[in-house]
Each structure stands twice: as C-alpha cells, then as structure tokens.
Image (cartoon, rainbow, N blue to C red):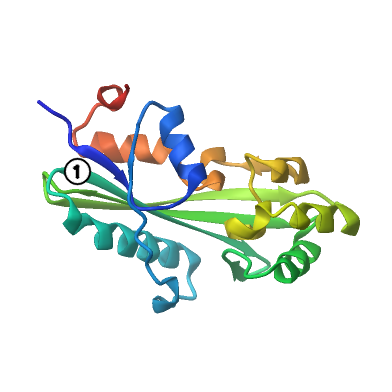
Amino acid sequence: MKLPSFVLASASVARRRLLQGVGIEPIIRPSNFDESQIKNADPLELVKALAKSKATLVAPEFEDALILGCDSLLVVEGKIYGKPETPEVAIARWLRMRAQQGTLYTGHCLIDRRQQRTLLRSGITQVYFGDITTATIEAYVNSGEPLNCAGAFALEGKGGLLIDRIEGCHSNVIGLSLPLLRAMLTDLGYKISDFWD
C-alpha cells in the first residue's frame, strides 16, 4: 500500500534536517499561524495547543497525508521563552540563562488524514547552560543564530558550545523528538522503515 505523504507544517530548517537525517523527505508547508492567538500559563499545554493549531491549519490542503506540527518553548526560573524578538532581547535573556538550568518543551501534533486520527504528545528535556562570559554571549547573538530559535540557542549549531549538558531527548531540543515521532507513527500503524528513501 502506498504511504501517505509526510508534511511538515513548519518553516524550521532544523526540523526538516532532522527528518531528512532519518530518511523522511517531508513536504514543507509552513502554517504561518499567529502564535499570539493562544495564551496558556502552562508551558506543556501551550506547546501542545500551538503544535495542534499549526498542523490543523495545514491539514485541509492534503487528502492523503501525515501532517506534523511542532512548537518549542524554553522555561527558565518559571518564565516561558519563545524566539527572541531582537538581538537586545536575546542578550538580556542569555545574561539570565547562563549557569542556569532550563526546561525545553516541544509539542508534537501528528494528523493522519487517511485514518482521520490526530495524536498530540510533548517532549521535555532539561538543559544546563554554561557559565559563559558576556563577551561570548554578545558574539553569539551577533552571529544571528539565536534569533530564530526558541530559547535563543541552537543545540545543533554554535549554541551547542554554550550548553554544559542536557538530560533527556537531544532532538527534542532541536525542535522535534525523534523517539516521540517513532512512537506516534507506530501508534498510527506505520513502520518507520517504510518512510526511508
């Protein structure tokens, strides 16, 4: 039986590369969902609601597809952080985050249009930030990398040098938990090896 198409409802290059790295070549269809529409003080519920909104917005475009929506947030000392709006915000955030522990939440929504089923899960990873100098923080922000990332760092990029360690799924920190995706596909009755090129 022919597999449904795999659609990534995100413009995230990091998520696309994660999927390609495990043999899934997704159709890229960013939802352009306005995240400010959803408010929730619980980061776990917030990332799930955002992920579901993104996938749901894209789903009607496809009749026979799996649509994956994701959203990531970082919580440090009880405060929720998404992408920093400006370099100044990113620097201020890093000054608060250095030598601290944060929790990275990623919501995952997988809609199976063929079976008319929707799965909603979330990954949680602990991140320990290095005690780095202000000059290093400024240089990192000036590289431009943290401005496109939840939490103002990219584990798979230069930001990986600024993290002491993580506890939990590392791909969750990059924006998509591969173990969680495997479990969701399995729950929907698919073999992950069927998606390999």
Helix, strand or loop under label 1: strand
Q: Considering only vertical position in the picture, is 90 above or below 177? A: below
- 74, 19: nearer the viewer: 19
Q: Quadrant of residue 177?
A: top left
Q: Residue at x 71, y 55 (%)?
A: 101
In x, y percent, where is residue 51? Answer: 37, 59
Figure quadrant of the N terminus: top left
In x, y percent, where is residue 102? Answer: 66, 57
Relative placement, left or right, of 62 versus 68 is left
Q: Residue at x 39, y 41 (%)?
A: 180
Q: Considering only vertical position in the picture, is 12 above or below 192? A: below
Q: Residue at x 33, y 37 (%)?
A: 183
Q: Residue at x 42, y 27 (%)?
A: 22
Note whether residue 133 is visible. no
Note whether residue 34 is visible. yes
In x, y percent, where is residue 150? Answer: 58, 58
For mark 1, does the 10 Å Cα neighbourhood hold few (<14), some (14 to 19), or many (20 or more) residues?
many
In x, y percent, where is residue 141? Answer: 75, 57
Residue type marked 1: Ala
Which residue in the protein does label 1 denote? 65
